[in-house]
Image (spheres, rainbow, N blue to C red):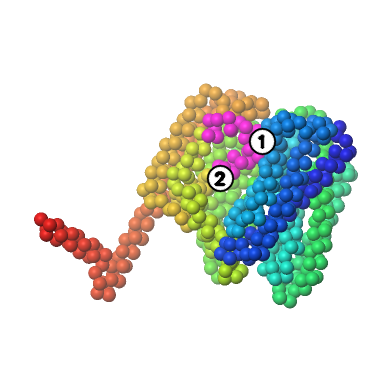
């Protein structure tokens, strides 16, 4: 039983750590996104904000280091002075998952405190921002026990909630550091981001509260009263945010009363800090538990959701267990795609219906394989896991790639706010043409990631370990999707590609992919040992009689579902090859006609003349 002093120190340490991490997000966001840049280079104002990031990251690092000690003391139920043993600390941060995540967070905070003041380009600042968000999110995967139920929903909604708050609160903090001239450019851009963040905060917060207080008597607890107070304060923040947007839309920026804006922002930031304090208290205290029948449920404890009934066609189509983190990613993707189409329509341009339908179908397949029937059954049988894998890695990516999201982004992303600024679109283009992007779109690299990762994942201990945890399962699904998107973008992508390979090379890569995939599938079908290292055995799935037979069935499913999309991609590549040759022939014909009309020899005549000159030189040399 931990002491009240230790509990108070833990809550205070978490509060300062959360505040430091949120302010770090805000300063990096302002330096790399809100402030004006000069073709990707930070201006003095951006560098000034970057230097402030040093101190927010340093405070975050100090709190993160202290929080490791306090967390270990709580886990071991020992006084703080007794956990200062080096071997004990080393074991915690190297062998325990939570300790590893907390150590990663500490190292990221230290790195940012050293690097942020020294960087002078928006690209590295953006990378540090993404690294900060990852460091904030990782420990949250351990914030909800799988045995409490609704694991994917609770963890995912909490991560979305915390990251959205980081953008919202951190952005307000960053605006407070700017002068009036800097606010003129920063406020309108942040206003758009804050709207999205506020929506995410409300929806994810409501979802998370429902998962933790999902029975009537829970709403009479102290935990619930703090949740209600947080809800009321959030509503107040939404009202202030509405006033900000109203002032921006109704007045010219040059006519705005920046003193009044700063006063309102100060009130908003003060309320946000109180909300952070309430959130810290909630994270340090366990929500009330409902006692149903007291029975231990193996499925809920291991997989985080109850054991589904025997698979049937209706259950595969109708069962749904929301994976909030994947749903959040899909919602953002859909919102951005719809936003892009709306921008085109407002401009008077059109976007093909086939691409809209293709994108929608791809999103549905992804959701089906992560939260729908196949996503649910994938936790309990290897054969269904392989179906979900094939949908994520083979089927959904084809539809997403054919919807041309990169082309849509290039046509609709906002330009720089000044002639010198690179802007969102310019940064996106710079990323597409960067050496790193050229490396990823190399056909051999795409093939190694697409097929080579199968052997690394399934023929080592990695698969069984990743299935045991929420973050492992999420990372695995995300890898399947991204690997498929990269591979099919390289092979049949309609979007711009900085290193587009010749059609013959793509065909060779496809044949290699078919061969490698077939070899992997045959290896699974002929396996004599289980590759999950006991994961499916501990679930005791009643409708799986033989785990080895189910594993071999998964291999055959992977072979069948994997070869068909590759064959379709092979046919599509042949068609694209023929079309490109036809377009090239038409181009040559048009060029010949144009040169003939001008009285000039065409390319073929020039080439024949060149050969004739070479022949004459050879005859003279003889």
Coordinates of residue 72 in the picture (x, y in percent): 77, 35
Near-viewer residue (432 or 83): 83
Label at residue 481: 2
Assign the N terminus to one quadrant of the image.
top right
**Residue at image coords 36%, 60%:** 583
Near-viewer residue (241 or 613): 613
Q: Is residue 621 left or right of residue 193?
A: left
- Residue at the spot of label 1: 469
Label at residue 526: none
**Residue at image coords 68%, 61%:** 48
Question: Does the stretch in magenta take in 467?
Answer: yes
Coordinates of residue 307 in the picture (x, y in percent): 69, 33
Q: Residue furthest top?
A: 528
Q: Is residue 341 above or below residue 99?
A: below
Q: Is residue 373 left or right of residue 512?
A: right
- Count the numbered circles shown: 2
Q: Which residues are magenta?
A: 456-482
Q: Residue furthest left?
A: 622
**Residue at image coords 61%, 31%:** 464
Observer-side mark, 2 or 1, equals 1
Question: Which is more N-terminal, label 1 or label 2?
Answer: 1
Looking at the image, can residue 377 be seen? no
Count residues near mark 2 (Cα–Cα under 10 Å), then give few for <14, some for 14-19, many for 20+: many
Coordinates of residue 139 in the picture (x, y in percent): 71, 41
Coordinates of residue 325 in the picture (x, y in percent): 67, 46
Secondary element at tag 2 = helix
User: What secondary structure characterizes most of the magenta part?
Assistant: helix
Q: Is residue 599 above or below residue 467?
A: below
**Residue at image coords 80%, 56%:** 272
Question: Does the stretch in magenta take in 622?
Answer: no
Near-viewer residue (29 or 298): 29
């Amino acid at each position: 039983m931990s002491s009240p002093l230790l509990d108070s120190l833990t809550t205070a340490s978490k509060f300062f750590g959360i505040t430091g991490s949120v302010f770090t997000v805000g300063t990096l966001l302002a330096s790399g996104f809100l402030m004006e840049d000069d073709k990707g280079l930070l201006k003095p104002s951006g560098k000034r904000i970057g230097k402030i990031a040093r101190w927010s990251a340093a405070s975050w690092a100090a709190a993160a280091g202290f929080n490791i000690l306090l967390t270990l003391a709580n886990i071991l139920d020992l006084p703080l002075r007794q956990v200062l043993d080096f071997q004990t600390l080393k074991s915690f941060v190297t062998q325990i998952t939570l300790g590893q995540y907390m150590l990663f967070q500490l190292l990221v905070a230290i790195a940012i405190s050293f690097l942020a003041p020294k960087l002078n380009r928006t690209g590295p600042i953006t990378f540090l921002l993404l690294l900060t968000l990852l460091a904030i999110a990782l420990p949250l995967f351990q914030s909800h026990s799988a045995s409490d139920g609704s694991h994917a929903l609770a963890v995912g909604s909490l991560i979305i909630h915390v990251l959205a708050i980081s953008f919202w609160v951190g952005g307000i903090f960053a605006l407070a550091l700017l002068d009036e001239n800097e606010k003129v450019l920063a406020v309108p851009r942040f206003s758009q981001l804050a709207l999205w963040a506020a929506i995410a905060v409300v929806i994810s917060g409501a979802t998370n509260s429902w998962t933790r207080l999902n029975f009537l008597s829970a709403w009479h607890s102290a935990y619930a009263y703090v949740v209600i107070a947080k809800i009321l304060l959030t509503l107040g923040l939404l009202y202030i945010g509405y006033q900000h947007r109203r002032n921006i839309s109704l007045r010219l920026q040059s006519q705005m009363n920046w003193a009044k804006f700063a006063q309102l922002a100060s009130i908003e930031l003060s309320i946000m800090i109180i909300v952070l304090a309430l959130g810290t208290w909630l994270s340090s205290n366990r929500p009330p538990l409902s006692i149903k029948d007291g029975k231990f449920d193996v499925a809920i404890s291991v997989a985080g959701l109850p054991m589904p009934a025997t698979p049937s066609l209706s259950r595969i189509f109708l069962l749904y267990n929301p994976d909030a983190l994947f749903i959040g990613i899909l919602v953002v993707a859909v919102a951005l795609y719809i936003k892009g189409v709306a921008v085109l329509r407002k401009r008077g341009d059109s976007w093909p219906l086939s691409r809209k339908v293709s994108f929608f179908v791809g999103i549905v397949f992804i959701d089906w394989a992560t939260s729908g029937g196949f996503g649910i059954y994938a936790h309990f049988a290897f054969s269904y896991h392989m179906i979900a894998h094939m949908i994520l890695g083979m089927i959904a990516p084809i539809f997403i790639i054919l919807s041309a999201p990169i082309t849509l982004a290039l046509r609709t992303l906002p330009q720089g706010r000044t002639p010198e600024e690179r802007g969102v679109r310019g940064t996106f283009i710079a990323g597409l043409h960067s050496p790193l992007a050229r490396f990823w779109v190399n056909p051999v690299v795409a093939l190694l990631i697409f097929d080579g990762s199968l052997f690394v994942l399934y023929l080592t201990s990695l698969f069984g370990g990743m299935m045991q945890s929420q973050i492992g399962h999420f990372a695995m699904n995300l890898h399947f999707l991204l690997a498929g998107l990269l591979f099919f973008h390289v092979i049949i992508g309609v979007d711009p590609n900085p290193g587009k390979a010749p059609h013959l090379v793509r065909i060779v890569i496809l044949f290699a992919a078919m061969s490698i995939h077939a070899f992997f599938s045959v290896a699974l079908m002929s396996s004599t040992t289980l590759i999950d290292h006991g994961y499916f055995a501990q679930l005791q799935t009643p409708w799986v009689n033989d785990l080895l037979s189910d594993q071999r069935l998964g291999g055959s499913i992977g072979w069948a579902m994997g070869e068909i999309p590759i064959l379709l991609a092979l046919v599509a590549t042949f068609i694209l090859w023929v079309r490109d040759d036809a377009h090239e022939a038409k181009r040559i014909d048009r060029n010949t006609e144009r040169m003939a009309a001008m009285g000039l020899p065409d390319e073929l005549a020039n080439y024949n003349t060149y050969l004739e000159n070479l022949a004459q030189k050879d005859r003279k040399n003889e």
